[in-house]
């Protein structure tokens, strides 16, 4: 059986564009002499459609495109081709209003229909909000083979959840039914080392079946889909996609005698085919910008490592002549930072602007105008009388002015503003409210050690930016680590708390050793981290940081989207109350 893996990039509601990509896959399959072509999950409407599905016209367009695909299959050139494509099926019975379905189409008819059995409701997924679960397998004869249909989560009954509508494992059911080939439609977003986890789960549960796994690629809001479609036969890989930047229509002969690759036997086995993290960040920015109808990008460039990495990602995503980097020095900015930013912009080829800010005069003027009330009951009068005025506000107004200038550029000239904050800083609230409320935050889900790693690997960011201590330069001799903790300690503290809900000191020490034993990198300096954990005051300092992170939920809730690349990211997959009496 010859199968075409139609790994395409869909957009919710782009019915015409999605149909064009589906037609291209059908034609590629026909020209490749294929018996079947498989598309990703919900390829017709796009994934995630979310509440758009409640609009009647959205459902009608979904049905119209499905009918177009059925009509196309009736043409003589395609009548022998079996088409498997994802769509939204309306539920005419009791339960949730829709089914997450896959249509099996051939010769002008929809000959089979599969409804997704297992509906994910963890992390970023909330499919039980919309879909009723299917309860049956779909098995059909094709080219002398017994073929089954699965949709994404149908492969992975591995969460230990009792709440799944189906307590059984569809993959195991297909294996028990003697299915030869399982066709799986997927919209599975990227997470670190997820390919290895997919392979390991398949190796454990597939048996002698052949699995054709087709995943979509591309950025969609906070998610980035990594493609990496594959064909597995028993315990061997027949095909593994490494394409993540264009639609790919790979043709695989499931009866091929070509020597296969061995499947890994454990989920921590690292794959040489793993898609590069940096490439996915670039992809997420490109898709977010282009799918939103923008062409130009603007960002504040300080000469620091975060803004440098974001500038490089932006240039690679849309081209350097579409990127506008604004330097905004204050009285506290070092000359070296400005020179580093200029050198970076020259290396990248983006546009360079300098707009100095004068915050001291502004602060003095504001405070003079706020002080016009002489009433002792007035807040301003009381604060000045008690000498409780917060000079931190004088520092922070510099960042707010920079945000104001970036937003003015965006509004005036039509460039999308990018945020430059990383996950470690976001956890601790060390970013300006408005900056993180720009349009998109490319490194929002990166810890500081990852920022350093990607900035160093690229070879284009000046060494001076990489080696100097990170600083917002809001006050003389200020450094970020002096205000918080060294990033070698802070990064793993944040990761353990956010991704694994570790909030006790002894549990954190155990988490660090477990990560080290598993070979996972969680710190830029493991020795420094271990030494700190042995210090006498580390336990109380740890708890104070945990309280700080918990208290910053109100700021994080207002941040803009950014690509999710970790197990748990700030955004739609993490749901913590802002007002709470629990720490």
Image (cartoon, rainbow, N blue to C red):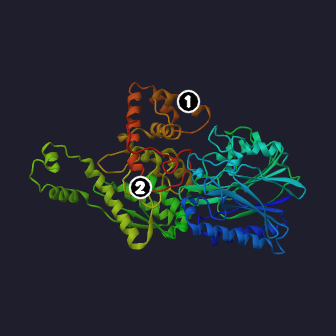
Furthest toward the front, the residue is: 94
Q: Is residue 257 or residue 233 the one in the foreground?
A: 233
Q: Residue at x 24, y 47 (%)?
A: 391
351 over 148 or under it: above or below: below
Q: Is residue 25 or residue 541 the one in the foreground?
A: 25
| Circle 1 residue | 513
Question: Measured from the top left, where is residue 56 in percent x and y?
Answer: 58, 67
Q: Is residue 475 or residue 193 the one in the foreground?
A: 193
Which of the labelled discs sits on residue 436, or is there none? 2
Q: Tag 1, which secondary structure?
A: helix
Which of the labelled discs sits on residue 353, or is there none? none
Q: Is residue 547 or residue 266 the one in the foreground?
A: 547
Residue 316 appears in the rendering: no
Question: Measured from the top left, where is residue 515 in percent x and y?
Answer: 57, 34
Q: Residue at x 52, y 38 (%)?
A: 523
Q: Of tags 1 and 2, which is closer to the observer?
A: 2
Q: Residue at x 14, y 42 (%)?
A: 386
Lower position in the chain sequence, tag 1 or tag 2: 2
Q: Tag 2, which secondary structure?
A: helix
Question: Measured from the top left, where is residue 227 in percent x and y?
Answer: 67, 56
532 over 199 or under it: above or below: above
In the displayed structure image, the side of residue 367 where residue 251 appears, left or right = right
């Amino acid at each position: 059986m010859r199968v075409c893996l139609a790994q395409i990039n869909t957009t919710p509601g782009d019915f015409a564009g999605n149909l064009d990509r589906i037609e291209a896959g059908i034609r590629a399959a026909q020209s490749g002499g294929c018996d079947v072509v498989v598309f990703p999950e919900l390829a017709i409407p796009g994934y995630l459609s979310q509440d758009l599905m409640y609009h009647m016209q959205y459902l009608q367009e979904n049905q119209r495109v499905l009918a177009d695909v059925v009509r196309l299959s009736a043409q003589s050139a395609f009548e022998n081709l079996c088409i498997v494509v994802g769509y939204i099926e309306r539920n005419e019975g009791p339960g949730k209003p829709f089914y997450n379905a896959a249509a099996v189409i051939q010769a002008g008819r929809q000959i089979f229909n599969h409804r997704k059995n297992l509906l994910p409701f963890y992390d970023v997924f909330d499919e039980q909000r919309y879909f009723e679960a299917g309860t049956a397998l779909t098995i059909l004869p094709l080219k002398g083979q017994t073929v089954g249909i699965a949709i994404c989560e149908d492969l992975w009954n591995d969460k230990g959840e009792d709440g799944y509508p189906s307590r059984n494992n569809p993959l195991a059911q297909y294996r028990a039914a003697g299915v030869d080939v399982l066709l799986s439609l997927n919209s599975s977003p990227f997470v670190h080392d997820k390919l290895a986890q997919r392979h390991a789960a398949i190796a454990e549960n597939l048996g002698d079946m052949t699995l054709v796994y087709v995943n979509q690629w591309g950025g969609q809001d906070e998610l980035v889909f990594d493609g990496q479609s594959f064909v597995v036969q028993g315990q061997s890989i027949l095909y593994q996609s490494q394409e993540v930047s264009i639609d790919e229509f790979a043709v695989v002969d499931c009866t091929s005698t070509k020597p296969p690759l061995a499947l890994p036997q454990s989920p921590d086995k690292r794959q040489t085919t793993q898609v590069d993290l940096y490439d996915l960040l670039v992809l997420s920015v490109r898709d977010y910008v282009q799918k939103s109808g923008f062409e130009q990008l603007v960002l504040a460039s300080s000469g620091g490592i975060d803004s440098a990495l974001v500038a490089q990602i932006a240039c690679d995503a849309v081209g350097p002549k579409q990127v506008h980097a604004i330097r905004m020095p204050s009285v506290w900015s070092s000359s070296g930072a400005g020179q580093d930013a200029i050198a970076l912009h020259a290396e990248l080829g983006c546009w360079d602007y300098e707009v100095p800010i004068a915050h001291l005069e502004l602060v003095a003027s504001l405070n003079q105008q706020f002080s016009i009330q002489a009433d002792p009951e007035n807040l301003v009068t009381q604060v000045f009388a008690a000498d409780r005025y917060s000079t931190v506000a004088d520092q922070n107004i510099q960042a707010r002015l920079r945000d104001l200038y970036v937003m003015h550029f965006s509004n005036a000239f039509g460039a999308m503003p990018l945020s430059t904050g990383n996950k470690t800083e976001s956890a601790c609230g060390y970013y300006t409210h408005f900056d993180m409320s720009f349009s998109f935050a490319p490194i929002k889900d990166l810890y500081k050690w990852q920022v350093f790693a990607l900035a160093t690997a690229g070879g284009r960011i000046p060494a001076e930016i990489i080696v100097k201590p990170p600083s917002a330069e809001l006050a003389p001799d200020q450094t970020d680590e002096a205000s918080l903790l060294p990033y070698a300690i802070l990064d793993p503290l944040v990761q353990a708390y956010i991704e694994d809900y570790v909030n006790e000191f002894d549990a954190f020490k155990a988490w660090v050793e477990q990560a080290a034993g598993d070979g996972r990198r969680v710190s830029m300096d493991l020795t420094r981290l271990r030494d700190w954990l042995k210090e006498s005051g580390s336990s109380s300092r740890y708890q104070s940081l945990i309280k700080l992170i918990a208290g910053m939920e109100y700021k994080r809730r207002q941040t803009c989207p950014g690509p999710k690349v970790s197990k748990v990211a700030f955004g739609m997959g993490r749901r913590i109350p802002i007002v709470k009496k629990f720490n």
